[in-house]
Amino acid sequence: MPNTSAAAGPPAAADLLADWTALLHRCGTGTDPEPYGRELLRRWAEPQRRYHTTDHLRAVLSHVDTLAGHADAPDTVRLAAWFHDAVYRPDRSENEERSAALAVRALTEAALPAARVAEVARLVRLTTTHRPAPGDRDGEVLCDADLAVLGGTPEAYAAYAAAVRAEYAFVPEPDFRAGRAAVLRRLLALPALYRTPAARERFDAPARANLAAELGLLEGSE
């Protein structure tokens, strides 16, 4: 996986590279983590991304830290956060599966234990549906961290929605509105958007308000 010729990335990513290096050392890597980290950061900075950027990665990792007390294996969840959108093409549907395969390849090359590698891949695949099974505490933490953006301020949510639309700029407006509205209705129909007590208390009510507001805008423009 490592591309040693890849650029180090913007200075703002230095904190992420340091966090990645420390994480791989805690997980017992037998190799130099830095080339892997640089390659991941290169992926997260690809030009087709508008929402799924290093800012999203940083936010998810921060939420994982906040919710870490709920996790059984917080560092495994952190590894999954690094890989969960490492492969991202908005015009393709297999991003999570490809990201999971990348995690298996990279973490195996980094000499991490096979059981941890398999668990990271499982968690990455879980972000396809964001529906962890009851008792899957690590899955709950990752999914809640990934969906925390829904519970931001109205201004932050509007910026998120605009970035999502920008990623799907190739989709005609009527088709985008219909598809996006279906996603919002599905989310609003869920009995629980968040599974961890802390995320549910902090994000559920504002997330539902944000989702309903966006849905109203979409339906009003039809």
Image: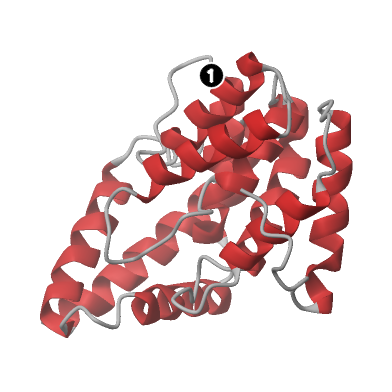
Above or below 114: residue 196: below
Q: Quadrant of residue 222?
A: bottom left
**Total numbered circles:** 1
- Residue 182: % across, % down: 19, 58
- Residue 158: % across, % down: 47, 78
Q: Nearer the viewer, residue 172 or 121?
A: 121
Above or below 59: residue 130: above
Looking at the rendered structure, the secondary structure element under dot 1 is loop
- Residue 119: % across, % down: 57, 22
Above or below 125: residue 60: below
Q: With 83 as the anchor, is 179 left or right in this view?
A: left
Q: Nearer the viewer, residue 37 or 148?
A: 37
Q: Quadrant of residue 23?
A: top right
Q: Quadrant of residue 5?
A: bottom right
| Residue beneath disc 1 | 136
Q: Nearer the viewer, residue 76 or 89?
A: 89
- Residue 111: % across, % down: 73, 26
Residue under the point 24% across and 66% down: 180
Of the residues shown, which amino acid type is indicated by label 1? Asp
